[in-house]
Amino acid sequence: MTTSRKTTTRNRTPAMPKDPHEVERRAYLQQMLDEGFDPADAKTIAEKTVFPTAQRRAPSDAKAIGDVVNQAQPARPQRAQREAKAIGDLLGETPAKPAPPPPKTRRETPIKPVYDYRYEELPSRVRDLIEAHLAIETADAKAAGSIGFMTRALAIATLPHRRVAEDRFVRKNGDFTLTMLTAHPEGLPYGTLPRLLLTWVCSEAVRTKEPVLSLGTSLASYLRELGLKNTGGKRGDITRLKHAMTTMFSAIISCRYEGRESWALQNVLLADRVEWWEPQNRDEAGEWQSRLLLSRPFFQECVDHPVPINMIAMKALRHSPLALDIYVWLTHRMSYLSKRTTIPWISLSAQFGADYARNDQGLRDFRRAFLRELKHVLTIYNTAKVSNSDNGLVLYPSPTHVPPKMTFDRENQGLLQF
């Protein structure tokens, strides 16, 4: 008779490893290897690392909370790096450094004068801009007499774009502040005509080297080039010209520069005297010719700090005061730009967009208008490298629109390097 022996199975606790922290130590070693540490250094660090005391053994039929939720957490990476450095100093070795984070990509959109009118007629303004660009590329600047000048102060801080109700107007550009004041009943100058008139005044001052300018034949020829006619009446070009002259030369311009340790202020009257006679034709006017006597500070500003510009471009952009301002400012800025520069939109709004509301919506409206006119400017000035980003307008070093060699000589009224 065979007697069956009852076999009793007991739950035996598995043998614990010699090192109670072997699991944590292995996980910690693997983490350091994944982070790029030297294997020998990582092994040394893992062996010398002191881990928290293990929890009490749970009942045989239960698991430790750490086993259910997660494995024991190794030391933080920062702590591991500190310990690795300390051990490396003792051993005379420098542990491998973790790889640097990947560089952040810049979200910029290059601005290019690209127009898609495959299914409709090209607007006349865009057509004029393209023709002006071609004329600038093909014409000899000296023979065409297409070089003009604007003052540096009015290149970095500009006139109003529209009629201003107040008698005070302020524009800011970094540490530079331009304030215009007037007591004239017609208010402050605004729009494109005062800008074009200032261009002629500055160009004549540089060309003649005299503060007294004749407003006869030279001005009439300049106005004809701009498409203005010798017409009177309430809305005639002559009436508009007189309004621009009286408001502009009646204003006082205050230029203030405020640095960290100093500041400077200068109040400038553009003209000391203006004589306007009709008719303007020299043969008919005789000795009674219209003249303009520039003030000494403004004359010196024109002669000492002229900003060279292309008159063909000014004529093509004359329909928008903002486009004129962007063109003069951009070619002036490129004359000394040496590295990539980002100009915040809020700063550009303070410099160019005084007609827009000082809130988020106003800033968006200004940015939209600025980019629209900048695209027109780049149609002519296509060598300027500019990008649009959320942080601001990004400028890259580019050639000026007027080559440095094409400027007037002070002695013989020729051209020389500027």
Image (cartoon, rainbow, N blue to C red):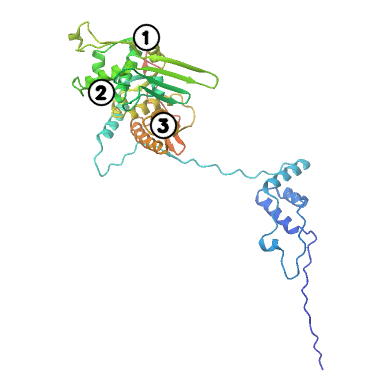
Residue 226, label in figure:
2
Viewer-side label of 1, 2: 2
User: Could you say which is closer to the camera, residue 376 or residue 241?
Assistant: 241
How many neighbours does mark 3 have within 10 angstroms: few (below 14), some (14-19), or many (20 or more)?
many
Q: Amino acid at mark 2?
A: Leu
Q: Is residue 174 above or below residue 4?
A: above
Residue 358: name its quadrant: top left
Residue 222 in sight from this viewpoint: no
Give the SS element for disc 1. Answer: loop
Q: Residue at x 70, y 46 (%)?
A: 79
With respect to residue 183, does 286 lie above or below? Answer: above
Is 352 situated above or below 64? above
* Mark 1 lies on residue: 411
Kind of residue indicated by mark 1: Glu
> Is there any visible trace of residue 179 in the rendered image?
yes
Residue underneath mark 3:
349
- Which corner quadrant holds the N terminus? bottom right
Which numbered circle lies on residue 31?
none
Q: Which residue occupies 76% across, 54% down?
A: 52
**Residue 373 image offset from top left, x and y in percent:** 34, 33
Seen in the picture, residue 77 relative to 126 is either above or below; the reply is below
Rendered image quadrant of residue 237: top left
Query: Horizontal and vertical percent for residue 256?
Result: 45, 19
Crowding around mark 2 (Cα neighbors within 10 Å: few <14, some 14 to 19, many 20+) is: some
